[in-house]
Amino acid sequence: MRREEILVEIRDVMADVLGIDADAEDVTEATTASDIEEWDSLSHIRLLVAIERKFKLRSRFTNSEIESLKRVGDLVTLIEKKTSA
Amino acid sequence: MIPNMPLHHVGIVLPSEEDVATMMALLGMQEDYRGFVPQWSALCIFAKADKGSLIEFVVPNGGPLERFNKGAGGVHHIALEVADLAETMRSYEAQGMKFLEPAPIKGAGPFLCNFLSPMFTRGTMIEFVQPL
């Protein structure tokens, strides 16, 4: 998948899990948890579990991967890596 | 790992004290004790059932708990009882895990408490409680 396609899917999951408007102008690759009030430590995990299911990832996010995610763009990169493996 | 940790209570987030009163009446429960925990920005009301099982009703006053389950509330955590919370934390931290608070905090009643980061339980909130 291309990065933009991944980002579109991530926005869908964020809208559902976080209950936010996640349009292209609301969520970009530069968006971080501190930009979105609803994105706290618990919803972060729920978001990632939902993303694992959405992308049917064979290998789950590890704790170190979860800790390393700072921006939405980091998440796109990680999904890109996991879906191409 | 700390073996044989009994259940101390189940935590349920509700939007208001009125909701707590309604739920306790529905379940035939009585309030046991309550307290405000500033670290969680929450009023915590403990209720006892006939056979002594504790339920903690958590009423958020700001903070992330207010958005739990999109504001509707619901079952939030289970709390397990330990004899020594600091030792329990050291045991989990030795395995690379983290807690929400760096040290045990005073709970709403006569106990210390802390939560394992949900990162290590894939979203299930686990609290450890040390009675005082």
Image (cartoon, coloured by chain):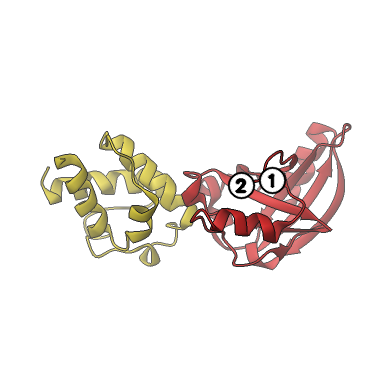
Chain colours: A yellow, B red
* Residue B4 versus residue B63 in the image, above or below: above
Residue at image position (53%, 45%) is B69
- Give the percent coordinates (x, y) of residue A15: 34, 47
Would residue B15 be visible to someone looking at this image? Answer: no
Task: Please tell me which residue is depicted at 26% across the width and 47% down the height of the picture.
Answer: A10
- The numbered dot on residue B79 is 1
Asked whether, in this view, residue B32 is left or right of residue B35, the answer is right
Tell me whether circle 2 and circle 1 mark residues in contact (CB < 8 Å): yes
- Picture quadrant of residue B44: bottom right
Tell me if residue A49 can be seen.
yes
Give how far across and how far down residue B110 sits, in percent.
84, 58
Q: Which amino acid does label 1 sit on?
A: Ala
In this rendered view, identify the residue nearer to me: A12 or A72: A72
Question: Whole-Å distance between the Cαs marked 2 and 1?
Answer: 6 Å
Asked which quadrant contains residue A50, the reply is: top left
Mark 2 residue crowding within 10 angstroms, few (<14) / some (14–19) / many (20+): many
Seen from the viewer's position, the closer of residues A74 and B87 is: B87
Give SS at disc 2. strand
Where does the C terminus of chain B fall, quadrant-wise? bottom right
Q: Which amino acid does label 2 sit on?
A: Ile
Q: Residue B10 carries which label?
A: none
* Image-based side of A26 in relation to B122, left or right: left
Residue A59 spot, x, y in % from top left: 29, 38
Would residue B74 be found to the left or right of residue B44 on screen?
left
Chain hosting mark 2: B
x and y percentages locating residue B5 in the rendered image: 71, 41
Number of other residues with Cα within 10 Å of mark 1, as a class: few under 14, some 14 to 19, many 20 or more: many
Mark 2 or mark 1: whose residue is earlier in sequence: 1
What label does residue B126 carry, if any? 2
Left or right of A40, for residue B110: right
